[in-house]
Image (cartoon, rainbow, N blue to C red):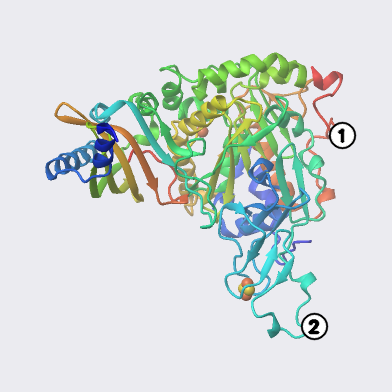
Amino acid sequence: MTDTATLKRTREGTAASLELTHALTQTLYREARLLDTENYADWAEMLAEDLHYHMPGIETRYRRDKTEQVTDLTRMAYYNDSKPEILKRLSRLETGTAWSEDPATRYTHIITNVEVELTEKADEFRVYSNFYAYRNRNERDEDSLVGNRIDIWRQVGHAFQLVKRRAILKHNVMLSKNLNIYI
Amino acid sequence: MRIERIGREPDYSRYMDLKEGWLDRRIFSDADIYEEELYRIFARSWLFVAHESQIPSSGDFLTTHMGEDAVIVARQPDGSIRVMLNSCPHRGNKVCFADAGNTRRFVCNYHGWAFDTAGDLKGMHEEYCYDAGDIDFKNHGLKNVAKVGNYKGLVFATFNSDAPSLEAWLGDFRWYLDMILDNEEGGTEFIGGCIKSVISANWKFGVENFIGDAYHAGWTHDSGARSMNNGQPFPPIDMQNSYHASMNGHGWEFGTEGVGDLVLLGRPKVMDYYNKIRPKMAERLGEMRSKIFGSVASASIFPNVSFLPGISTFRQWQPKGPMQFELKTWVIVNKAMPDDIKEEVTKGVMQTFGPGGTFEMDDGENWENCTTVNRGVVTRHERLHYRCGIGREIEHDTLPGIVYRGQYNDANQRGFYQRWLDMMTHDEFGKMPARPEPRLGNVAETRDLPGLFAL
Ligand code: FES
Ligand SMILES: [Fe+2]
């Protein structure tokens, strides 16, 4: 066995140090704060150029049914985006004519259950987390989106950039009229 | 099967005057009117239930609703498709809880009654508890609908044994439908999966928006159009060369510039693909239809299916009470497309008309507020304005249907509500007026039509 293979085997899936775990947890919190305050310009700075942002649609199927719903990228997905595609969606808000965003939606992202693991790449980390994203609009329009995320974050200098995100929303019928939110 | 409801016979014609161009707001929230819609419209119409590509193999099934009635759509060993109530004849429990899958049997969770994919009762838990004569197996299967039909891949079903054939129901609208279902050899398929969302609005707002409301697009979707098309506003509308066409409540509004909706999809490769096949499309469907396809356009099939030809979102507005519907969205693509083009279309649809799409986000908000505000006890008695373009009806040599000039128009919406009124007021299908008299008659195939329609 070569040294690299041994290295891969020992790094992959290993829990990260307390320090790294803290740094990445803080990164997730910062990201949540930027999304809560609609600071999308700074959020976009946290996204790697080779980002893949994926939120699959989840059908209800029997346990014996082995249809791959989560990782099959040819299936319907709320998001299956590259960074330029996310920026395209975001550019809608900059037009000043996104009528349904004015008055603004009020957001809170609660991020919990953070676990950080090393990967085979020295500068990339796998980060598990849970999200509770709450939205409230106008008088009493509200909804709650809950689920899990698996991310890959890459260290760039002293900061981290999001390279991959898979967010699994627990809804089958999404109990909301739209998804004017990033998770 | 005959679905009857006794008792309430209000005069629905007082809820609208389509010659004058107004509607009464109560049809968007009144609970009694909604119940009546379930009987008179949903239980009597042909309803879309599946695309055949969703259930290609024997034993494949999916579950959906016809109106508010839960149904199973299942492929049979002989290749045919059956549609049956998703409700056990013993105590009524739901027998299938999955959105889709493959099975030999549907077995009820309550007492274990087991049905094959045709709905026939095959056995049950502790069968000895029934004495001879207690159960007639033949008559205690899952109730099948009255008729199932397939138009170029779209599977429809109806509870109404008096319904005309599916071809007659779609009528001249088939001439238009073929622009999405048959613009290339091989037909169409749905991309895997279905995205469902809930909108607290009356189902008719979704249908009428897609059937004719080009007018909202340039305003509501200014931000969406600019985000998908490099900051450019909505493509300009040519009022001389764009139309509304309405046939028995089905409707298609469209330009003839050939590119508007493709631009809004924001995927240059998809544009290139269609431009490449367009000469063939012209041979296949005629010059006129090859120019309509890809233009700014939208369409609805009565009563509750809509789509955007060119953008390729295909959707159904499932009623869930007078003030809520469930929106089911799919992506429809040509089977002959290479995989990378299918992927481009899918991404484009989800970025424009998925729940997080740059267009979709602005629609639901409008329909919800139309619904809730219209309900006010004083507000509901105020009429709504549906007169746009009321004087612009034309005769057109090529275009079937009741045709109006100018895509900014309420004509198709008036046509939809006229059919709604016809169905709400006529007990017998055969007595309902044809609007208009069909031109295509019984022709089975619009592709090879000579002369008039092939232009
Ligand atoms: S309700 Fe289905 S077996 Fe009893
Ligand atoms: Fe719209």
- Report whether B48 appears left or right of B272: right
Report the chain holding disc 1: B
Front position in the image: B3 or B23:
B3
Element type where label 1 sits in the image: loop
Q: Nearer the viewer, mark 2 or mark 1?
A: 2
In screen coordinates, is A61 left or right of A98? Answer: right
Using the image, tell me which numbered label, if any, was put on residue B417: none
**Marked residue nearer the N-terminal end (2 or 1):** 2
Tag 2 subunit: B
Which part of the image, by quadrant, shows the C terminus of chain A?
Answer: top left
User: Which percent across, then down, holds residue B231?
Assistant: 40, 17
- Look at mark 1 in the image and give the residue it sits on: B441
Vertical order, A5 against B232 (above or below): below
Q: What residue type is disc 1 on?
A: Gly
x then y, percent, for residue A33: 21, 39
Query: Is A173 rendered above or below residue A99?
Result: below
Question: Would you name the residue on which mark 2 appears?
Answer: B133
Q: Is residue B345 among the parts visible in the rendering?
A: yes
